[in-house]
Amino acid sequence: MARSLDTALAGRELAVGRLRVPAHATADLAGWRVLGTATHGKHLLTRLARGGETPLTLHTHLRMDGQWALLDPGRRLPSRLVPDVRAVLVTAQDPAAPGGGRTAAALRMPVVELLPTAREHDVVGHLGPDLLAPDFDAAEAVRRLGSDPQRPLAAALLDQRLVAGLGNLWANELCFLIGRSPWTPVGEVDLPRLVALAARALRASAAGTTGYQVTTGNTRRGEDHWVAGRAGKPCRRCGTSVRMVEEVPGDPGRRRTWWCPHCQPGPGPDR
């Protein structure tokens, strides 16, 4: 998503910049230039500058329902989506930066914050090492993941304070790829191998090398994942029916979970 926002906005001045959230309803970003969008885990940090003013960062997070919609010049959102808009950024026409007039609209975005760029640490400082960062600290990620050896593996992978960037799909697929039950105590797992695999997989996905969030190597729809979304279907490796348990409301470490009981030995969900 950061790459798409950069393509649409980076290096361009905004003709329109409105945030439709109570905390920033009066903010006007028209005239600000978008420097680019960085990420930390699943957090998006769109940085802006204008003359000698304090640089600002628009912090957004999609969580489960948010979306950035990108529109070409002259295109508008369908009227049914207008009530869902939480931020709208429209680039100005500029001969020095062709491609102006594009619109980026944040839909159903649960997190929309505007803060001084120097204070980005306030919103991402609690996060663990970012798997996609150029300076990703694998040793620190291993240390954090192993800090509670009895914690279930999938829950540890989903904790952004330990390592940032893994969503529920990746947590489930990584458990399958290393052949361990999602409820295996994390202390029983080869964490350096797991962290290296996670970093390699996410970077390949982000770069488009393997296809977005493709874990099987097959980009055909319905064949791109090992277990995620495949409840009741035969395991691609052994033919055993893939099992699934629903998420526990209010518990971010117990999301909907898929696994193959044969290929992923270890504790079950009643652990």
Image: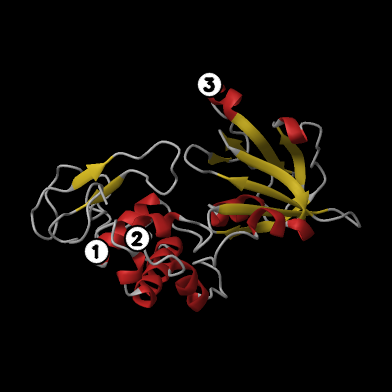
Residue under label 2: 153
Can residue 200 be seen in the rendering of this structure?
A: yes
* Mark 1 crowd level (few <14, some 14–19, many ≥20, 10 Å Cα): many
Distance from disc 1 to disc 3, alpha carbons, whole Å, reads: 44 Å
Q: Nearer the viewer, mark 3 or mark 2?
A: 2
Q: Picture coordinates of residue 271 (x, y %)?
A: 27, 52
Number of numbered labels in the structure image? 3
Q: Which residue reaches farthest top?
A: 80
Disc 2 crowd, CA 10 A, few/some/many (<14, 14-19, 20+): many
Q: Residue at x 29, y 47 (%)?
A: 257
- Compare residues 18 and 197 and report the one nearer the observer: 197
The three-letter code of the residue at mark 3 reads: Arg
Query: Marks 3/2: CA distance?
Result: 41 Å
Going from the N terminus, do you reach mark 1 or mark 3 first?
3
Q: Amino acid at mark 1?
A: Arg
Residue at x 59% of width, y 51% of height: 5
| Quadrant hosting residue 122 | bottom right
Residue at 45 percent across and 73 percent down: it is 142
Mark before the other along the chain sequence, 3 or 2? 3
